[in-house]
Amino acid sequence: MKQLLIATHNQGKVAEFREMLPDFEIKSAADFDLPEPEETQDTFAGNAILKARAAMEATGLPCLADDSGLTIDALDGAPGIYSARWAQTPNGRDFMVAMNAVNEKLDGVKGDETAHFIAVLALLKPDGTQQIFEGRASGHLSWPPRGEKGFGYDPIFIPEGHDITFAEMEPSEKHAMSHRAKAVAKFVEYLKTNG
Ligand code: IMP
């Protein structure tokens, strides 16, 4: 089985990648005790490349990194690349804090605010090859947060054509339509022709 290192410490993401890429032995940054590089770029792609490069240089393995987030149209795309940082507290990440920040900045979520989850994957191989794959899931916000499944902002996001949040869906249902699933589908398509 081919090894692929997913350059993330987020166990929610690792679990999703394992489910979506059953033909790979998925390793995570935590398996190698890799430090989390500071995300200094101002685009999802820039940060994904930065994370994949750091992991590849440390392990010599082909690395896939994902940078993702929620962009809210009424907030000019925020939190965007700062999605994880909005959850930062002195005791670690707390997404209730991040969702409350969204609610406050919108002066109370009304329930019709359009939003998009975006995922950008960067694949870096030891031979220097670099590829980018992007996926997007559009929908609208909902308040109060609902559902116990998923992670991050899932409890306040209702995807287009549905009336339940990502956090209320079965993981398989979310994975059939999520931003990450769409980016992964492009990655899998690429693998078919490029091994
Ligand atoms: P990063 O890609 O690790 O820098 O962080 C992305 C952040 O965006 C996550 O910590 C979540 O807050 C948010 N995010 C990305 N994808 C999802 C998702 O599928 N559901 C909920 N939140 C997500």
Image: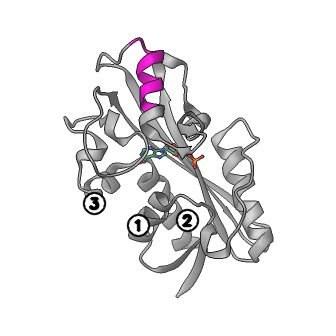
Q: Which residues are magenta?
A: 98-107
Coordinates of residue 81 in the picture (x, y in percent):
61, 37
Residue 124 image-quadrant placement: bottom right
Dot 2 falls on a residue whose secondary structure is helix
Asked whether residue 2 is in view, the answer is yes
- Residue at the front extreme of this rendering: 91
Amino acid under disc 1: Met
The numbered disc on residue 172 is 3
Pointers 2 and 1 in contact (CB under 8 A)?
A: no
On residue 190, which mark appears?
Answer: 2
Amino acid type shown at disc 3? Ser
Predominant SS of the magenta segment? helix
Of the two numbered discs 2 and 1 on the same chain, state the one appearing first in sequence. 1
Q: Residues within 10 Å of mark 2 (few under 14, many from 20)?
A: few
Residue lying furthest bottom: 1
Q: Give the quadrant of the C terminus.
A: bottom right
Which one is earlier in the sequence, the residue at label 3 or at label 2? 3
Residue at x-position 30% and y-position 33%: 145
Any mark on residue 79, and which? none
Residue under the image location 63 percent in, 42 percent down: 44
| Numbered disc in front, either 2 or 1 | 1
Q: CA distance from mark 1 to mark 3?
A: 9 Å
* Front disc: 3 or 2: 3
State the residue at coordinates (72%, 45%): 39
The type of residue carrying mark 2 is Tyr
Q: Is residue 99 magenta?
A: yes
Measured as percent of width and height from the top left, residue 23 is found at: 45, 80
Q: Residues within 10 Å of mark 1 (few under 14, many from 20)?
A: some
How far is the residue under mark 2 from the one under mark 1? Answer: 15 Å
What is the quadrant of residue 8 in the picture?
bottom right
